[in-house]
Image (tube, rainbow, N blue to C red):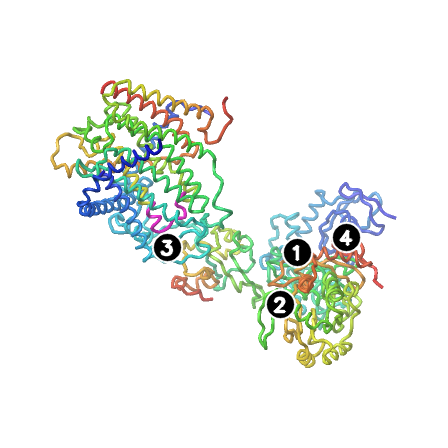
Amino acid sequence: MLVEWVAWLLRTVAEAVFPFLASWTWIPWYTIGLIHVAAAVLGVISVIAMFLIWLERKVSAHIQDRLGPMRVGGWHGWAQSIADGIKLLLKEDIIPAMADKPVFKLAPMIIFAASFMSFVVLPFSRTLIVSDLNIGILYVYGISTITVIGIIAAGWASNNKWSLYGAMRSAAQLVSYEVPVGFSLLAGVLMAGSLSTVEITLTQAGGIWHWGIWRCFPFSFIAALLLYVGALAETNRTPFDIPEAESELVAGYHTEYSGFRFALFFLAEYTNMFITSALVVILFLGGFTGPIPVSFVPDFIAGPFWFVSKTLFLVFVMMWIRWTLPRLRVDQLMSTCWKYLIPLSLVNLGAIGLWVSLRG
Amino acid sequence: MERLTFWQKLYLPEILRGLAVTTRHFFANLLGQRHTVTQQYPEQPTRVSPRYRGRHRLMRKEDGSPRCTACMLCATACPALCIHIEAAEHEDPTVEKYPAVFTIDELRCVFCGLCVEACPCDAIRMDTGVFALAAYKREHFLYPRNLLLGDEEPRHIAEGRAPLD
Amino acid sequence: MLEFYNVFWFLIIGLVFVLVNLWLSSLLRPSDPYDVKLTPYECGEESQGTGFVRFNPRFYVIGLIFLLFDIETVFMFPWAVVLKGAGPFVLIEMVIFLAILVVGLVYAWGKRDLEWIKLPTRW
Amino acid sequence: MAKKLTIDGKEILARDDATIIEAAHEAGIVIPHYCYHPKLSIAGNCRMCLVEIEGRPKLEISCNTRVADDMVVYTQSPRVIEGRRGVLEFLLINHPLDCPICDQAGECGLQDYYMQYGLYHSRFLEAKVHKRKVVDLGPDIVFDAERCILCTRCVRFCQEITKTNELGLFYRGDTVEIDTFPGKRLDNKYAGNTVDICPVGALTSKDFRFKIRVWFLQETKSICPGCARGCNIFIHHHDGRVYRLKPRRNDAVNDTWICDAGRFGYKAINEQRLLHPMQRQGEAWQRVSWAQALAQVSETLQRHAGAVALLVAPQGTNEDCYLLARLAREVLSAPQVVLYPGEPGDEDDLLLRADKNPNTRGAQDMGLPPPVSTAQLASLVAAVEQGQVRVLYAIDVNLQQAFGADTLARLAGHLDCLVFQGANTLPGWEQAHVALPSCTYAERDGTFTNFQGRVQRLNAAFRPRGEALPAWQIYQRLANALGQSWDYPSAEAILADIATRVPAYAGLSYAKIGDLGCLVGTTP
């Protein structure tokens, strides 16, 4: 029995891998191209993250009747994030004496790599995508959960009370909100009937009235809202920023991190904001498609434009919410998820399922 | 306690109202800086109110000698124990004693102003409006008598030298 | 498979990016560790006791319930892709599947395991 | 016979010849006063101690009214308070308002009673009478005539206690002043007490003036180590530094006085202290740890067993002496122990004793030999020179005074090791090879036995300066370094041991000794 099963497994793997290896001749060229793509994506991520950090500071400042950074780089301190990045690069790297050093060093890498890998499936246009995985949504859902491991590792390895508390809270929060996020993603998948991000987007092509958010109104709208709320929690942002509640936990799981390792956490946080917002855009807001069916510019310009602007708008709303709402208490956070969001998302999923199966 | 209605429990209207408030501020400040209170400090000097408690100074009598009689009431009132006075006999028997040493540790000071309240001679004031004390070493924050009297400017402290006494 | 080959390279390049930057920064940054600097940060106070403190056992309960839901969600992804046009029977199947899950949730709720502070069970 | 009277509704039994103020104070009822002093004659000139006596039309001064049977006295009635207020207003008419620069502020009778009974707005419109300020009355006394309320306590003190009669009242009316008689200065050996008894800031001590405000001072009960009298004192200290000594009332020992020599003895606590164990290497002293120093001393003592002499001044407490005696008897093999009290000093019939050591009697009670004179030290010198003594352990001894500088240098050359132990760098200490710092009487608990046989307590006022240790701890560590396992946790534990071992001290404990001491019999 066992032997048969192992044999089957080996055969399956071999069947999948051999044709791939058989055509190894193209691999070097392809890989070199791929490295260029990856480097470009890294550049995009860095620019996006630095821009978002600057944006957050300006948004928060203006909401709070301040000005925010004004000096570095001249116009409204546009170079502040670059300066901060250079500063963090030059900062001493302090690892607490009692820290679990390998884990401590690994944690920011895990978190950054996870957020970086999610970019593989973000469709900036019909063709401008690294890989249109046929399980794109599931892939993002899975990869983004790896962040939890990084956070727990960071909190555990720091040998600091605040870090550990922050990590535990963060883990509890991330896994809890994973559930409504998952159901809401399912709702989107149900409506589109595919897991590929490009295909999902294409089902919404043809103008704003085709977007997923209207498809099973109001259930699709509720699903979008739940996904967005879950996204806030998944990125540890106010009002769900209990894991790094500075008034009680200093800085939560990254209390002990300094220098470039700290920068990685920061980079990952803002990258994740972009990715989660992008997910909402892909599933419910038409992705790279424009609000009107007629296109005056080629797709490789209009696609990224619409995709990035929609996503940035959602990121802006995240910031807007952060500087409006106070932080939830940890028990409120948990009961909001388990007692309201999860039942609601379940019912909502059922309704969309009914809708889809009845009306096709 | 008043029980919340369903709408109140949902919090959504309140959240939206909160978002409206922040939006109003955001755009008002973005477009016209209408509410912004930021001062660009070194270029735009900060105005301190007349009652602002800044760095201390010691007052003088009409003849130029310190008003302080070394009664140590300021040192007694000081909750941070930052005032150190050593009294000495004055040549003039009608004056009796004077502060031979009067040092304030501006790092320990909590700027509560109790020394000013305690002083029976109006010898110590905190009306200099100086709030940006800076020095390169902790010991340079020990402001001696001549500095508090204004005989000497704290300029050399900024230059990283010890205050002369 | 090609797509996953890309993913693999993204993982490698992500890690390489981090390592290269850390190496770069190690060339530039100062390093002056001493005992006090390396103590756990507790707001400037001297750190007390160990860093491995007790935490709320609720975290485990949350973790357990999450596991159930997460596995169910994974089961539902293929279902979601094919539901369109598969007819109401497929839907009913999943509803039954979900109902079992919901019973579990209701049970945990009733046991007050969703409360942050554990209260006596209702029954 | 005792008189039975009522003060403020409280039934009181008083001595036959007691005054009302005495009876009241005995009963714990405080009557404000300036000129009254329990150890001086009654002057009755400040009028502050007014009380109301039932059946008498006027308020009477309680300091000069004898008690009578069935007398009913009120000390807090509205009339009395009104009367005190009036008296205070009179006293303050010409009093300057210089509390901020007055050293008495904080312990001033005028300030205290003004806050209790005065609190009026001044009705005095005329110019105040100005008198002399900062008058130099004597080597330590400064007088301010304006602040004086003419209670004449100081005058009476010089007449009745020291009988030196330096002070008197001069001029009359509102210009009357206290001054020394022509050609005299207030320089008797007890002059400092006039500052203590002055209820206002008229007499101040040059030594204490302006050093610190009195409200910063903490007070610790102690015993003056200046002579065999063992005057009871308060140590006034702040932040580990002693600022002055004040006499503490003990009618059996010192009434309410101390001599000036004792009063200024506190300087030894602040100055010229030996703070760390030290070793001499050639001419240079090197700071070492206690462990190193004691290792060296114990090693030397062991190496020269049988050729050890202990030269002890009776400055240590009973506890120290007891452990030292045990050390000599049980640990070291038959050392020569010499108790050397130094040269005798002044003596009079008031307080001063010729023996300038606080504990000569206690040291003998604890098992140390009878004291020897300077001349008798010759045999010790001879023993050193003949090589019978190779190690000399000098404790609290002024070596220069004991041997003379030349002999001391010669002795140090003969000796294998000269150990000096003391709180201060006494003259001649630099000839030693090892120096062990012990703490002063202000830094430790313990007991002294004065010449009368009264055991009195010291209390630690603050932590020992530097690395100094109480002498008994040094002996204990030394004994343990030599193989014993002594384990006295505190001086109190040693006294408990003494109480069981020394017959005369049987049953003594710190609680029993209390603040005023306890007489013990003489050990035969």
Q: Is residue D150 visible?
A: no
Q: Which circle's residue, 2 or 4, is located before the other in the chain?
A: 2
Q: How many neighbours does mark 4 have within 10 angstroms: few (below 14), some (14-19), or many (20 or more)?
A: few
Q: Sequence-wise, which precedes: disc 1 or disc 2? A: 1
Circle 1 sits on which residue? D219
Nearest to the eye among marks 4 and 3: give it.
3
Q: Is residue D190 left or right of residue B129?
A: right
Residue A92 — which label?
3
In this view, the residue in front, D285 or A174, is: A174
In the image, which disc is placed on residue D293? 2
**The residue tagged with tag 2: helix, strand or loop?**
helix
Please tell me the numbered disc located at residue D512: 4
Q: Nearer the viewer, mark 1 or mark 3?
A: 3
- Seen in the image, is A334 located left or right of residue D155? left
Span shown in magenta: A252-265
Q: Is residue A35 magenta?
A: no
Q: Residues within 10 Å of mark 1 (few under 14, many from 20)?
A: some
Q: Could you tell me which residue is drawn at 27 percent across and 23 percent down?
A: A218
* Amino acid type, mark 1: Glu
Image side of residue B85 versus residue C26, left or right:
right
Quadrant in the picture for the N terminus of chain C: top left
Judged by depth in the image, the label closer to the viewer, 2 or 4, is: 2
